[in-house]
Amino acid sequence: MAGALKKAFYATFALELLFGMYLLIFDTLLQSLGALHWTMLLVYLAIVLVLAMGYYKQEKKMYLFIAGTISILAFVFMLADAAFGLPLSQAHSVSPGFGWAYLFGFGTNAVSSFSTSFAFTGLFVFVLLNAAIAFTLYRKSH
């Protein structure tokens, strides 16, 4: 069971990293209007990458606990960011519901694109999955 969980941890992390990197490289609105968001995403991905590599090398429970905690915080911040209309970006208060429209619009409105919404939704889901797996591994490790 632990072997399968470890594989799931690294698989979800790899997908999380791919979705995050896509947003960092190709989301031009994120780069131009959300420089702080861009930086926070980069820092988050770097920290989780270091923790995943540390766990791979040493298998210490501490790495799992910190990775899970940081992932839960990232999930909560992404949800709050969308709900409050991207308050830390230059696009804040553009219109009511702008955060939801941009992040989860899937190209159905003027501010979103399918690729950005798909990448953000993928990141959103895999951040939560990665946290759940990290905490499960943490509880099951000796």
Image (cartoon, helix red, strand yellow):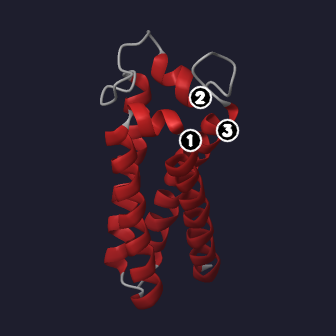
Please state which of residues 108 and 25 is positioned toward the viewer in this rendering. Answer: 25
Q: Which residue was labeled with disc 3?
A: 115
Amino acid beneath label 3: Ser
Query: Residue 14, image x and y in percent?
Result: 59, 66
Using the image, determine if residue 98 lies above or below residue 53.
above
Tag nearer the camera, 3 or 2: 3
Using the image, determine if residue 136 lies above or below residue 98.
below
Q: Which residue was labeled with disc 1?
A: 120
Residue 27 visible from this viewpoint: yes
Query: Residue 78, image x and y in percent?
Result: 42, 38
**Farthest residue, direction bottom:** 58
Q: Is residue 106 left or right of residue 30?
A: right
Task: Check the picture and name the quadrant holding the C terminus.
Answer: bottom left
Circle 2 packing at 10 Å, graded few (<14), some (14-19), many (20+), is many
Query: Residue 21, image x and y in percent?
Result: 54, 56
Tag nearer the camera, 1 or 3: 3
Amino acid beneath label 2: Phe
Please state which of residues 50 and 76 is positioned toward the viewer in this rendering. Answer: 50
Instruction: Please give the name of the residue rendered at 58% of the width and 45% of the height, measured from the top-left corner.
Output: 26
Inter-mark Cα distance, 1 to 3? 8 Å
**Farthest residue, direction top:** 95
Circle 3 packing at 10 Å, graded few (<14), some (14-19), many (20+), is some
Q: Earlier along the polypeptide chain: callout 3 or callout 2? A: 2
Amino acid beneath label 1: Phe
Q: Which residue was labeled with disc 2?
A: 104
Q: Is residue 66 left or right of residue 138?
A: left
Classify mark 3: helix, strand or loop.
Answer: helix
**Decide: marks 1, 3 in contact (CB < 8 A)?**
no
